[in-house]
Image: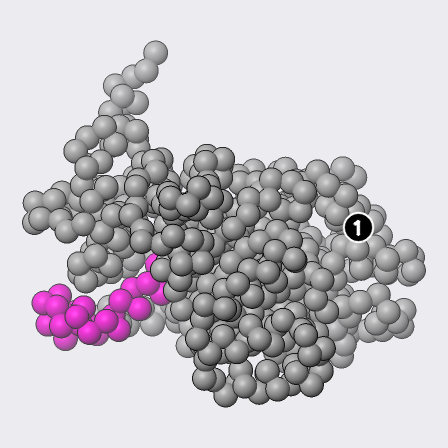
Amino acid sequence: MTNKTDRKQLTLRRLLNTSFNTIYRKLVMGQELNREESIDILSIAVVLVSQTSTELNRLGYRIVLLYGNLTGDFIPLYDISINTGLMPVAKLIKTITSFNDSKLFHSSFIDEFTESYLDTFRENEITHTEQQLVLTNFFDENSQNSIALVAPTSYGKSELIITSIKNNKHKKFCILVPSKSLLSQTKKRVLDAQIDWIEKIVSHPEMHDEDLTNAVYILTQERLSRLLSVDKSLSFDFLFVDEAHNLLSNDSRNELLASVINILKFRNSQVAIKYLTPFLKDTSNLGLRHSNTIELEYLIKEYVKSERFYTADFRLGNGNTKFYDQYINEFIDNASESDSAITYILEKSAEKNIIYFNKPKDIEAFAMELTEVLEPITDEDISIAVEELSVNLHQDYKLVECLKKGVVYHHGSMTEMVRNYVEYLFRISPSLKYLISSSTLLEGVNLPIEKLFVMNCKKGRSNLTGSQFKNWLGESIDLVKYFLLSIQVV
């Protein structure tokens, strides 16, 4: 029997059965709110962020974020960011001129006090969130234990790896990554850290030497498996398993991943295994047969992003475009003047966009189609890149022509050197606006992406799963499975 306390508990379903639903719809669709509606929606947001439910907390944050973007009034977002530990958001808001001109900061004492408070979260010119600082301490205190860390993409997991390597000199480290692209990025970060005791980074079995000391190994499971077969005595003190949720996938690659972890545990029972994943409800699921159980776990619950989903279907030529909200779980008509996938992407695109296709041939075909409707760009870095690629690649290589229009593409059939060059160019050049890619760049690789266009709901031969989509977004999204089942291919 339900008691009175349970009946009064605030839930999302109960909230959506009130007038809140109408005001919230106006807010998410960018419609102007009157004063009374603004007061109501902000009052509800304050209540939501104080609830124990993560879902309600995130909805409260989403409301004040959308309100700030709609009205230019970021004081509610600032207040909630300060009180929930989202200090980078608060720091960014303080740079907004309209915010600093507000009455809130007419007092120099309040201004200096809040600035001093924000400084306590700053390290090496980087402002951290409250949970990031707690996480760093947790990681340091348990450096010798096997742990599971659940934190969103771009949350600072790479920095934790670097710090661990710095603090454990002359120990044997192995970092397991799921893709060659992530391998290259991780290797670059370790190199850029300039850790004094590292003499060599081994990223391929042929680079290994049994007498090698002071080396860090960064490998995919396939490369590590070959290496373990060659050197029967190879073992490690620390093993980082990046994108560890892949262990839950029932396929040959991740069966191999589980196998190499078990081998390393067998060779050194004291190896400290660090499982890193952007999402997982129950970390005990990562436990492997014949391997040690996870001793400790740390789950990040902070929520900085608030994703917006749009669907568009031009297969019948009528441009059926909708907006999907993951909280009210509804598709709302969203008018668009676009008459094709190309024009829709041009309409919705930001400064940096990634466009997903499943197959290399579709990637290159769409890149050329997009290139045809764009104007040439003027950029010194890109001009140099075009010249270099024209000399070193075949004259019919499509990438050169795409570069001239601010478009690049990336897939597994390209050489590793060219893929790395494409990633580098996309990071450094503001003129490169579109990156068309397969899943090779959507699993753990950090790129300056503002918008993701999913043009195909398959990955390989299988349908794209909810967990894969969550990983691409870098955040755990409620109702994302339903969204994937309902999404229409552009």
In the image, is 148 to the left or to the right of 208?
left
| Residue positioned most to the left | 35
Kindly identify the residue that appears in the image at 52 percent across and 50 percent down. Answer: 455
**Label 1: few (<14), some or many (≥20) within 10 Å?**
some
Question: In the rendered view, would you say 378 is above or below 110?
Answer: below
Residue 41 vs residue 296, the one in the foreground:
41
Kindly identify the residue that appears in the image at 24 percent across and 59 percent down. Answer: 69
Q: Is residue 95 magenta?
A: yes
Q: Is residue 355 in view from this perspective?
A: yes
Residue 110 vs residue 431, the one in the foreground:
431
The residue that label 1 is drawn on is: 260
Question: In the rendered view, would you say 464 is above or below 116?
Answer: above
Kindly identify the residue that appears in the image at 90 percent across and 69 percent down. Answer: 210
Q: Which residues are magenta?
A: 86-112
Q: Position of residue 458 (x, y in %)?
A: 60, 44
Residue 235 vs residue 353, the one in the foreground:
353
Q: For residue 168, which quarter of the picture?
A: bottom right
Residue 301 vs residue 249, the one in the foreground:
249
Q: Is residue 242 magenta?
A: no
Q: Position of residue 386 (x, y in %)?
A: 59, 82
Q: For residue 414, which quarter of the picture?
A: bottom right
Q: Position of residue 187 (x, y in %)?
A: 67, 71
